[in-house]
Amino acid sequence: MTTQTPPFHRLLSFYSNRSPTPDTQTIRLQDSLHGNLALGLDFPVALAIAVGRHLYLKNTGLFSLNIHVPSVSTTQTLLDGVPVEEKESYSCSELVQLAAQNGWAGRADAVGLWALAADVGTGRIEGRDVVAFQRGTLLRDIEARRKDRSQVLPLWRGGPISVAGHSWVVGRVFGVEVYRDEGKRD
C-alpha cells in the first residue's frame, strides 16, 4: 500500500495480506483470526476480536462478514493527534491520559494498544510504537516480536494459558508461527 493510504487502512492491510491468495483489498474472517493469532493473542481472544471487527466494519453485504478495506470510512486511528515522544516510554495510565483528548474511544484504544504492544517485562510502551500505530505500520513489528518466546503476552493481556500448547496448536491448525521454542522444532 502506498504512503497515500490512510493509517487505519494500513493497519487493516496487515489482515488483508494474510490470505493464501492475497487480495489486499478484502479481509475475510479467517484472515483476521490468523492475524490476531500472529500478534500473540490466545485463540478465544483472537476469535472474539476478529468477529467483533467484522461485525463492526463489514461492508460487503447483509450476510457477508468480509471487509472491503477501501470502503471503510474510518481513515485515522483513535490515537490520531495524541502527542507522544518517540524516544519516551509510557505506562498504560500515562497513555490513557494522553488519549483522553479523543474521548472514551481513544482511551479504550490506548488500553488495547498498550495491552498488545507494551514490553512484558517493564509494562511500558515505547513512543516509537505509538507513533508507528498512528501511522498504521505497527502490527508487522508486533508479529515479529511474537515469533519467539522473549515477549509472550501474559494471560491478562490476551496471551495464551499454555505457551507451548498454544504455539503447537496454532502452528498445526492455522499455520501461524508464534512463540516458537528456538531449541525445539515440531
Image (spheres, rainbow, N blue to C red):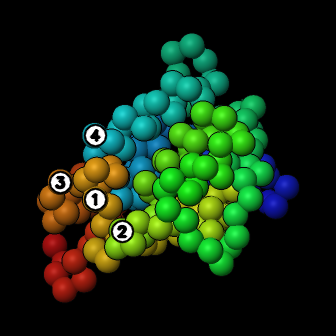
Q: Residue 44 carries which label?
A: 4
- Res. 137 visible in picture: no
Q: Decide if residue 170 is on the left or right side of residue 11.
A: left
Which residue, as the protein is rendered here, is positioned at the far right?
4
Judge depth for marks 3 and 4 and give the one in front: 3
- Which amino acid type corresponds to the residue marked 3 in the rendered image? Ile
Residue 6 versus residue 180 in the image, above or below: above
**Circle 2 is placed at which residue position?**
120
Name the residue at 33% across, 42% down.
45
**Circle 1 is placed at which residue position?**
154
Q: Which mark is residue 45?
A: none
Say which of 41 and 78 sits in front.
Answer: 78
- Which amino acid type corresponds to the residue marked 2 in the rendered image? Val
Sequence-wise, the earlier of marks 2 and 1 is 2
Judge depth for marks 3 and 2 and give the one in front: 2
Residue 63 rendering spot, x and y as whole percentages: 51, 15
- Which amino acid type corresponds to the residue marked 4 in the rendered image? Pro
Name the residue at 34% across, 73% down.
121
- Which amino acid type corresponds to the residue marked 1 in the rendered image? Pro
Q: Distance between the residues labelled 4 and 2?
A: 20 Å
Quadrant in which the N terminus is drawn? bottom right
Sequence-wise, the earlier of marks 1 and 4 is 4
Residue 94 rendering spot, x and y as whole percentages: 56, 57
- Res. 87 visible in picture: yes
Residue 91 rendering spot, x and y as whole percentages: 50, 62
Residue 3 rendering spot, x and y as whole percentages: 82, 61
Q: Which mark is residue 161?
A: 3
Q: What element carries label 1?
A: loop
Residue 117 versus residue 186 in the image, above or below: above
Cβ atoms under marks 4 and 2 closer than 8 Å: no
Say which of 159 and 164 sits in front.
Answer: 159
